Amino acid sequence: MRTPPSEPPLRTPARTLAWEARPARALLALAGPITLSGFSFAIMGVVDTLLVGALGAAELAGVGLGLVVTNGLMGFGFGLLRGVKILLAQARGRGADESARVYVGAGVMVALALGLAMTALGELAALFVPRFAASVEAGEAARRYIAVRSLGMPLILAYVALREARYGYGETRSPLVSALIGNVVHAVLDLVALFVLGWGAAGAALANVLAFMLQGALLWAAQRETGIAFGAAERAARWEVVRAGAFTGMQWALEIGSVAALSLLLAGVSDRDMAAHQIAVQLAAFCFLPALALAESATVLAAEAVGRERSDLVLQVARAARNVAVAYAAVCALALVGGGGLIARGFTDDPALAALVRSVLIATAAHQLFEAVALAGHGVLRGVGAARLSALCALACAWLCTPWLGVLFVRVLELGAVGAWLARSFEFACASIIVWRYIERGAWQKRTRSADLVAPALATQELPPSRPSVAA
């Protein structure tokens, strides 16, 4: 089909890539801003935990349970919308820059539709989740938190779609700026909702939703420079976004689901164990996000290499990502073990809870090492188009290890929150071994092609003009 006059023909890019001589430096350059902007989730959770902790262990346990459930419901969307970034990165590798805004519009529409479905599930979950809490007070706090935060799920997922689009362009400044502004606003709203208005768990959830709404609005404004296309090509591209991110979405949903099942198991033990688990979750999120950002950077570089038909660079990217991940995770583990007592006292004045938190953080340290290495491998596999393999490996490890070992450690051996984190450590140890054996052997080259994530629907349609649409 003839290329329309408004759409210039695809240029044939040179085979060299600017970062190929120093992939580790390129990974760090991308991962730094992604880490800082990704803290929007972690910092909000930590602020909620610190402030709600002043209201008591039951309220803290309820908010922790609510966070796990709502993030679990959105987990599929978190993973699926990463397809936007992969499609854009591969398009940039091929020199097909003009199709990018179509993927952005498709990602936003997929996010809104998925968010509405998750809202309905969230309101339903708010009715049943309180039954898993160890006390009536914790159950009521969880119900209020889930009911309010679920209303904001379409906006939160739309923010994720816009953020992934900016990463796909290789642009990390606007997500970073929006995250910094959003977190400052969230902290102020949290203080007002909890200590001025006295809204408790519901106030914490409302502050969370409003902060993400602001971040999404800021990214929407940033996207005006490149435009967001809506129309026939965008509607066709929605399925390409779904196809590119479906396996990653299932991976995220079921991985978070296994964690949610573990949290529900733990919630019935005691409010103190659940509160200690919630503190460990928020601290682990800080360690997790730079490792996740490194994996996302590896995805982008691997996708660019495949799009440029430079498969020889993939192993270089993979090994650089793994080396950086190991060094970073070792620092985190030492900090959690060495500073566990000081960290615990910063979250609670309860001596028994502080002692439990310190023990949990030792188990969390081991978990960080294995998780960082596994994440780097998964990121590379997604970038080369082996998202299905990555998802199957993650799902097998998550559901064959975490829930069942959780029952053994938490209930049978009565290790409580410590047992929960030991179960997760086993999960990521298994995933690390499987993923890296596959990458080092180069087996992915036999099962993936550079066109696996390229949108065939767009190849048969005329794209809209290159100017930004009115909707942008």
Image (cartoon, grey):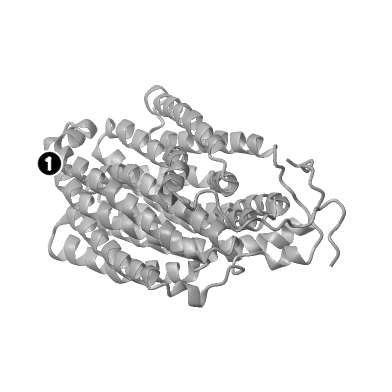
**How packed is label 1: few (under 14 Cα within 10 Å), some, or many (20 or more)?**
some
Looking at the figure, which quarter contains the N terminus?
Answer: bottom right
Residue 151 or 346: which is nearer the viewer? 346
Residue 305: x and y in percent read: 54, 59
Residue 329 visible somewhere in the drawing:
yes
Residue at the extreme bottom of the image, as rendered: 446
Residue 121 visible somewhere in the drawing:
no
Q: Residue at x 49, y 73 (%)?
A: 445
Residue 182: x and y in percent read: 49, 32
In the rendered image, the vertical position of residue 101 relative to residue 452, given as above or below: above
Looking at the figure, which quarter contains the C terminus?
Answer: top right
Residue 174 or 127: which is nearer the viewer? 174
The number of discs equals 1
Residue at the extreme top of the image, as rendered: 196
The amino acid sitting under disc 1 is Ala
Residue 427: x and y in percent read: 28, 64
Residue 422 or 28: which is nearer the viewer? 28
Q: Please give left or right for residue 285 compared with residue 95 in the image.
A: left
In the rendered image, the vertical position of residue 108 relative to residue 53, given as above or below: below
Q: Quadrant of residue 261?
A: bottom left
Which secondary structure lies at badge 1?
helix
Residue beneath label 1, please?
Answer: 355
Residue 456: x and y in percent read: 70, 68
Q: Residue at x 79, y 47 (%)?
A: 466
Q: Residue at x 46, y 56 (%)?
A: 75
Q: Residue at x 54, y 35 (%)?
A: 173
Q: Quadrant of residue 170?
A: top right
Residue 321 or 431: which is nearer the viewer? 321
